[in-house]
Amino acid sequence: MSKNLLSKDIDNISLSILHELCYNARTSAAEIGRRVGLTAPAVGERIKKLEDLGYVKGYTALLDLDKLGLKIQAFVSFKCHHKAKDINKIIGGFPEITEWHTITGNSSMLLKITTNTREQLAKIIMQLEEYGDTNTSLILQSNTEINLLKIDSLK
């Protein structure tokens, strides 16, 4: 993405602040300021502005799902045979669906399912097949610890 595609509200310092927040949202404003060359109050003001403008939607914790006993994770391509207005109700009935995305291609959705057993995953897939077609891929390894923008490519 080139700079001309970015909003005028974002300069290189704000991009650097976003990078720091993506890496560790608990980093203090003073530490971020040290890294980007601003005072802590200036960083705080920029973060508040980025939040107010909607660039920062929220802050989350990354959990170790294996330690929580949720060792089975899968992506399921799902082609729903019901009306679009029913999809939220269908998907909402499965707390094991931790992400869902409307996509292009042969399927209408990509679901991420997190469970503690293969049997539980099989049961969910069988229930989903009452509403449409599925294609399941088990997740063997993930690199989701750092959700960083490619900041350098935006500058």
Image (tube, rainbow, N blue to C red):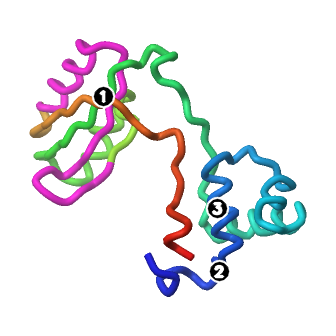
Could you say whether the residue bearing mark 2 is in a helix, strand or loop? loop
Q: Looking at the picture, tell me which residue is in the foreground, 107 or 8.
A: 8
Residue highlighted by disc 2: 9
Q: What element carries label 3?
A: helix
Q: Which residue is the site of mark 1? A: 140
Q: In this view, does 70 lie to the left or right of 21?
A: left
- Residue that appears at 14% across and 50% down: 107
Residue located beneath label 3 in the image? 18
The spot of residue 94 in percent (x, y) is 33, 30
Q: What stretch is highlighted in magenta?
A: 101-129
* 46 with respect to 105 (left or right): right
Residue 120 magenta-drawn? yes
Q: How crowded is mark 3: few (under 14 residues within 10 Å), some or many (20 or more)?
A: many
Residue 119 % position (x, y): 23, 12
Quadrant in the rendering for residue 91:
top left
Considering only order in the chain, which callout, 1 or 2, is on the residue closer to the N terminus? 2
Residue 153: horizontal and vertical position, in percent?
Answer: 49, 71
Residue drawn 81% across the image and 49% down it: 28
Q: How crowded is mark 2: few (under 14 residues within 10 Å), some or many (20 or more)?
A: few
Q: Residue at x 21, y 18 (%)?
A: 123
